[in-house]
Amino acid sequence: MSRPTLDGPAAAARAALPESESAAFDRLAGAVLASSSAPLGAVLRAQLPGTAGVRWLRQEQLPPTARAAALTAEHWLSLYECWSSVHPTPGPRAAGGRRGGRPSTHGHAPGASAIPRWGQ
């Protein structure tokens, strides 16, 4: 998968981040810029859980009808900080996490179990 081509404020914000966070920033910027004609309120509803997008817009004093082109480099950095606080970065989990290895042996997702069949 190729990296999205960023320019303007998004590129400036990406340059300000450490290299280790650039892939995560690219995911966020790609999702936001893919719908550049859509209002940010709708775009952020898909990227941030609950009312986090609305709270972020209010914190940055942006209307929900603003477009991605209206974001400054400071907005991008603030949005990335908000987004990364709720989206864990992909990769190996810390010790105790359940990543990799064999899939569940009982045919369900980890932690799930079959519906009990009473009377059988």
Image: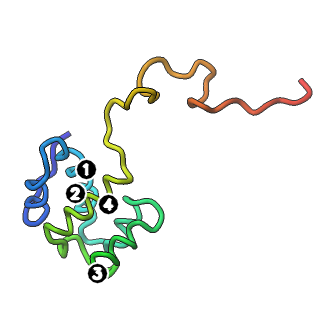
Secondary structure at badge 3 equals loop
Q: Are marks 2 and 1 in contact (CB under 8 Å)?
A: yes
Rounded to the nearest angstrom, the CA distance separating label 3 from label 4 is 15 Å
Which of the two marks, 4 or 1, is nearer to us in this view? 4
Residue type, numbered disc 2: Ala
Task: Please give the label number shown on residue 61.
Answer: 3
Point 45% across, 68% down: residue: 51
Which residue is labeled 1 in the image?
A: 27
Near mark 1 (Cα within 10 A), the count class, few <14, some 14-19 or many ≥20, is few
Residue 112, percent across and down? 63, 32
Q: Quadrant of the N terminus?
A: top left
Residue 15 sits in quarter: bottom left
Residue extending farthest to the right is 119
Of residues 57 and 35, the one nearer the viewer is: 57
Residue 13, percent across and down? 13, 60
Q: Are marks 2 and 3 in contact (CB under 8 Å)?
A: no
Rounded to the nearest angstrom, the CA distance separating label 3 from label 1 is 24 Å
Rounded to the nearest angstrom, the CA distance separating label 2 from label 3 is 20 Å
Task: Please give the label number shown on residue 29.
Answer: 2
Residue 90 sits in quarter: top left
Residue 111, percent across and down? 60, 31
- The tag earlier along the polypeptide, 2 or 3, is 2
